[in-house]
Image (cartoon, helix red, strand yellow):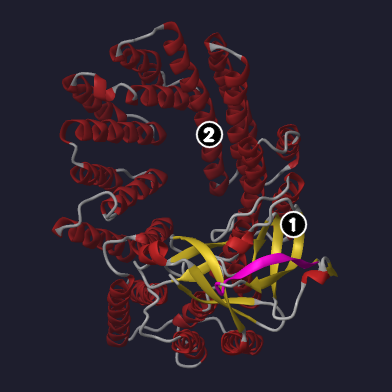
Amino acid sequence: MAQRVVKTTYLLGLLFFVAALVYFFASNWPELGRLTKVSIGIGFMVLFYATSATVFRRHFLSKWLFIFGAITFGICVALIGQVYNSHADSFLLFFIWFIPTAVLAWFTRYRFLSVFSFGLLQLTFWFYYFPSSYQIERGEWTSFFLLLLFAVVNGIISFLGRPSIVSNLAYIAMHGWLFVIFVQGISTDQFHFWSYAYAVILVLFLMYVKKQPYFICTVLFTGMFWVVQYFRFVERHFSGNWYIFGLVLAAVIVYIGIYALRWMKKRSNGKVEKVFLVAFQIIVTGVASVIAIGSIMQLLSFWFDVFSPYWLFSISVFLFVIPGLLWKRWNDVVRYTLLAIGYILGAFSVTEVSFIVISVYIAILFIVSWRMSAGVRAMTNMAVSLYFAMMMIDEWSDIRFTLFTVFVFYGIIYWMTKHTYERLVFLVFSFATLLLLTSADLVVVDWAYVVWNILFLGFVALVLFFRTNEREQWVAWAYTCLFLALKYYEWVWDLLHKSITLAIVGVCLFILAAFVQQRKAISFSVTKQKWLPLFVVMILQFAFIVYVTFDKEQHIQYGQQIKLQLEPIDPRSLIQGDYVRLQYEISTIEGINEWGKVQVVLRKDETGIHRLVGIYSLNGKKRNSDVYQEGDVLVNGHIYGNTIIYGIETYFVPEKTGGEIQLHARFAYVRVSKTGDALLEKVSER
């Protein structure tokens, strides 16, 4: 027990301290110069790596200090992008971060690093296709093959890699990108053939995939695909009368699900497989319920211009909830589907029915549920909490009191129930409601807001220190990270002040853990690590940061300065802080549709502003080179259709100053190197 408490305290201290680093650099404190900021980042990276290899080499912290060193490398890369105004959340940032992290994960076999590097790869794909600091329009086939490439890469990782959590995540990501193609095709009216091809691909996976996690994932995406297709089909081609067939379709899905579950149970022989059986059951129930509820609501609106909420409430209770609760001999899929339909239909009428009637109904459901199986009890209590919350919001409009009441309700069920997975479900919901209470976007910022934040951290500590279930502890860690992410985006407190607070808390936790470890004479067993290949990667990371910083400084000092006209807007980066997105006059060339690397000619006009004259070269081949005159400037970029991206579309600013810059900035001063690369130096109103 004492050893676990010390470990947890150490890790919380490290997590808070690294979060403090991210907050500090994201605040873009103007008192620090460019080289000072980069030096601080490098210093902490070296500190983490060095203490991992020396001071804590025989301590369990060696692993985590090493991991946080790898994370700090990415923070340094992001910091370079910030101080030299590279793209916010650039795919290159995450790709550069991914390469050494993946190599280190390969050498160390640390599961966290493997999962983290996989996440960086997905962020690379995402921000390549959906850049945050500029907008580009790709051709239909370019878009399709890019998204397909992302899916194929994940498929290769999944099927050729050794069985692990990463291979499972890669399989999910593969299906996710295939589904993104489907959604993109619908939203942009492209890839019309893909709906048919995707349906065939899903069927083939269902037929030939053997691993149960893969099979369940395929079922999930198949269900999502057919739900979307069903409602699209009905909306396009049929009137309300067709929705009667939606009920038939829901029944067919349940019927197929029953036989699929029986087939899977014959193959099931372990606890892990039982988890996936439950997951399959939930998916079948969810898909059938969505289709049935949509059909019922459409039928009612088609048959009746106005219908009483009491009718809807009665239908939900007598046709679905009561049969689902009482007829225990029915198959679980049938019962869960009936209950899901009944509870969701009831939610549509809760605030329109008598307060007393709903109160009695909720009380009966809560009492009856404790004589039911764990799955039915969990569904029923979730419905009870939803109804109760809706009633409280409708009566008193106090979201804080409502969320806290729901949190207490979930907490009571968590402590009362003995079923492992039911406890896990209500722990997840308990954390979710409490996390919402800590959001400044939902509640008033006053003394109670501080109390909710302290209560959340106390609940985290309670689970981490006193619960022995590993899954419950992972839930607490996940919500701790979500809490830190939420605080990062909150406006109520400056990032700099948050950073100082987190750093102090982190250091105090670290000192406390070290004191308890020494007092209790606690020792840790560690796995010996081969440090030579790791040192090589670390040195390369250090050399990369130093080289890029030196190159950017040379660019700033010796590059030719030009003045460009711009139009700014203002968001916040994932880890780099506030920035202003810049749209230049020279970013668009009308009447052209080209793709690739481009070099353009800029010429200074009588007002001192550099204007676009024309394209000098495209993909290395000269084009209209005769437009270049002495005194002109050649600038490199990438052209997408008629839009040119120069890499100077982002200007990072100190926290909460972006709005002012947005109002006043009209010109950008850019340094152009001899090779044509552009680097944004500053923006100004004149």
The image shows residue 479, relative to residue 261, as above or below, that is below
Which residue sits at x=35%, y=83%?
522
Quadrant where the N terminus sits is bottom left
- Label 1: how many Cα within 10 Å (few below 14, some 14–19, many 20+): some
**Tag 1: amino acid:** Ile
Q: Position of residue 250 (x, y in %)?
A: 55, 20
Residue visible at 22% across and 23% down in the picture: 358
Numbered tag placed on residue 156 in the rendering: 1
Horizontally, residue 153 falls left or right of residue 469, namely right
Query: Residue 59, can we see it?
Result: yes
Name the outermost residue toward the top.
303
Q: Does the magenta portion include 369?
A: no
Q: Is residue 121 visible?
A: no
Residue topped by disc 2: 281
Task: Tell me: residue 545, above or below residue 411.
Answer: below
| Image quadrant assignment for residue 232 | top right
- From the viewer's side, name the closer residue of 543 and 83: 83
Q: Position of residue 179 (x, y in %)?
A: 64, 42
Q: Nearer the viewer, residue 471 or 133?
A: 133
Where is residue 223? Give x, y as percent: 59, 33
Q: Which residues are magenta?
A: 607-617
Residue 349 in the figure: left or right of residue 395: right
Q: Secondary structure at mark 1?
A: helix
Q: Are marks 1 and 2 in contact (CB under 8 Å)?
A: no
Main SS of the magenta part reads: strand
Which label is found at residue 306?
none
Give the image quarter of residue 412.
top left
User: Tag 2 or tag 1, which sits nearer the N-term?
Assistant: 1
Tell me the distance, in whole angstroms, between the alpha carbons under discs 1 and 2: 29 Å
